[in-house]
Image (cartoon, rainbow, N blue to C red):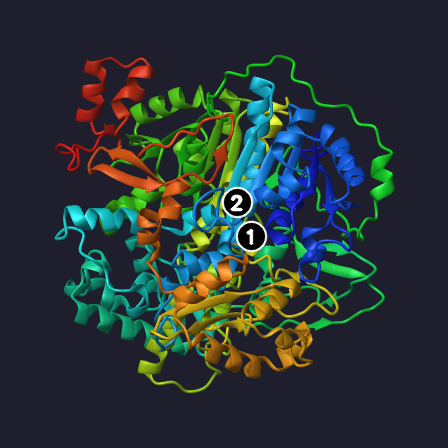
Amino acid sequence: MAGPLSDLRVIDLSSGPVGGMATMVMADFGADVIKVERPGGDPFRYLGTSPMWLRGKRSVELDLKRKVEQERLHQLAATADVVISSFRSHAAVALSADYDVLSSLNSGLVYVQISGFGLRGPYVGYPGYEDVVAAKTGRMQAFAGTAKRDGPQFAAVQVASHAASQSAVTGALAGLIARERIGLGQYIETSMLRGMLPYEQGGLISAQLSELNPELFPAMPPPAARMPTIQYQPVKTKDGWMQLGNLLRGQFDSFLAATELHELIVDERMQGSPALWEPAVLEEARDRVLTRMQEKTTAEWIALFSELGNIAAHAFQTTQQAMDDPDLRDNDMVVEVLDSRLGVLVKDNISIFESVLGQVMVEADEESGRSEQLGLLAKLETTPGEVGGMAPAVGQHTFDVSGEDRERWRGEQLRPDDADPPLAGLTVLEFASIIAAPLGASQLADLGARVIKVEPIGGDPYRQLGGGVGATRVNASKESISINLKSEEGQKILAGLIENVDLIISNFRPGVPERLGFGYEQVKAVRPDVVYLAMNGYGQSGPGAHRPSAHPVPGAGAGGALFQAGEGFPPEEGDQSLEEIRETARRLFRSNEVNPDPNTSMAIMSAAMLALYARTKGLGGQRVALDMLGANAYANADDFIRYRGKPERKAPDADLYGTGPLSRLYECQDGSWIYLGLHLEKEWQQFCKRIGSPDLATDGRFSSREGREIHADELAGLLAELFAAETADYWEGEMSVSGLGCVRADGPAPPQFWREDAHAGQNGLVTPVIHAKWGDIVRHGPLWNMGRSSLSLGPAPIIGEQTDSILAELGYDEAAIAQLHSDGVVDSEVVEAAAGG
């Protein structure tokens, strides 16, 4: 069956993998994507992943500096539904490719601009590269101390790229859903800068609460200086390293029982949350865990944990090794794309033990023409989509497309004054906990959906951790109702909620929703057109389908953690002292930071929007499935492809300075730090001119990528000497006027950047709200700016904050509601007057 976007034409005016991944997803789900390339093609075609993010598209080569070629673009835009552009605003105007021009030819056009640093403010001219944005927003500063050296440290996983690409998909679909209602398209902006927001997981709120109540919310030591939470401990086995992920006490006790550490379960000093144990007791328990885990191989532990269930763990592996992980393969996250220019022969029938141990056999096969790439973002049961074919050659379809005649979209009824949010009128029930699914649902709430978080009595367990700061971060803009779903009356309330639901988001393991009354078939019987999104750790098929997961597990399993840890890490196998094991574990966990959860959230919002768009077009509801491991494969898309001759993904060096002399941190005159991020040849040439050494660009050692790689240490030494002569602020000022990626990297940490930086304020990256418990605070801003539709940016609710009002909507009177509270069927948190207002 055709994909949900088979009625759409998308014009891709972007360059590189961020817009490329967005339009790849749209092509995979049926859209006719026409990539408009400059003469010679997209300048980022040199990247090893370009065969993937170009797949399934048609290529048109246009020189938009010429009037006649601009007119050809206008003809395409007049018949399009969506434009995805990464042009800077002034460049788009100069090329007659901006929203004002194109929408004058097509009033139904949804135009999504992916900018680097937003539309205004002092950094608007900075290049929108992942590394440059990470340095400027304090993300590299947040990794300080990961390697044992001073200063900020390189941020490796492409989190902003992943979030920005999925924000472009979601923004485009939101604009199209709004178009069905109002008859008009609109301009939508997202950015790499906004793409960093999902990875700010509570620091912004915590900093404000620390000011309000420093005793209750004390300042935390830098993350890199802390040992891991013991439930999330990386452990050395007899033959490798494994990541544990048993945050909740029941799971942790299951792990202790499986490893026969029964004494830790009954020890009176070790009761309750490990976060409350005495430090010496915690470290004693940690050492016992680290010692015990060395007694078996990784495969033996995984087999035991899989047999017992309820224990989350995964081997640390590279992204290339992850491509042979049976859970990713069994869930079709690794697919074959035939391309006569590429080819690889992969060992068949990989066992789980071979995958865990990294025993992968790959041989070149020039006859096969095979590549292996990412599969579909999610499984949509009714409108499944299909991975596109081989990437087009530059301009391959120029003449074919120019001769096509496509009917223009016309709105049946125009409502130009309708400024409601795109998802206004949609009701979402969220049955989910912790970060990944709740944060994905929160983004839909920002787009105007009414998201009702259905919580157990006592609330989402995440509310009990860290004073509830993290839960406040991921539940913005929602309502909350707290129900005992195991009670008869609770089931009656649930039935009332289901009567009006449009979308359900669940992260329960298979079987649990059915036992609690909100399984897909149960809901579908009441709401036949419901969209039902089920997220789990490992997918619906494969050996891990019934196993739990938590954020560090897919970080280890998809390769992001080892990539961030740096070259040659962890150390080669051999005897290590307990102290050395503790240090390796600390660095591994710091490298496996919070990103796997938000990575999944970004996939959740896009998958939900794909199904909601299909429903809007009359294709009905359907079941949608995705998993954390697959979502994190997408976040590691810069290496999730395999073919003959593919260049290796460059890992950061062991000290986390960077991946090469032009993508590297350098110390400056006053002990400050600059990050240099140059990715195109023209940028290297401009940089050399700017420093007054144009001959450096033509020096045979440094005049090509290959030469710079061979002489990397020599070039890094020259640049280190150069940067040491002035301050980081000086260098940023000198290079920013030329639009080069050269920014100070040791400025404010992310919470301070979002809250205090003038550029962040001018781009609306925080917004004030009134929280029921904490009063006037600022929360993160939205992932989008919308030209026509408004957004709905509210605070997070406290437990059951809307319980009574929702019950009243369902027809319960005050006496009945009071009785439900008295019987323990429902709950609402009671708080004193808000601290700030």
Q: Which residue is mark 2?
A: 603
Give how far across and how far down residue 381 sits, in percent.
62, 36
Rendered-image quadrant of the C terminus? top left
Within the image, what quadrant is residue 723 found in?
Answer: bottom left
Q: Which residue is mark 1?
A: 630
> Which marked residue is nearer to the observer: mark 2 or mark 1?
2
The amino acid at mark 2 is Ala
Give how far across and how far down residue 787 sits, in percent.
51, 29
Instruction: Give the class, few, some or many, for how many residues have Cα within 10 Å of label 1's Cα (few <14, many ≥20).
Output: many
Query: For the residue labelled by badge 2, is the local secondary structure a helix, a strand or a loop?
Result: helix
For the residues labelled 2 and 1, the Cα–Cα distance comes to 9 Å
Q: Compared with residue 424, is residue 362 higher up or lower down, i.e. above or below?
A: below
Q: Is residue 612 visible?
A: no
The amino acid at mark 1 is Gly
Residue in the image at 54% along x and 49% along y: 539
Query: For the residue labelled by badge 1, is the local secondary structure a helix, a strand or a loop?
Result: helix
Residue in the image at 44% along x and 79% along y: 238
Rendered-image quadrant of the N terminus? top right
Q: Is residue 834 visible?
A: yes
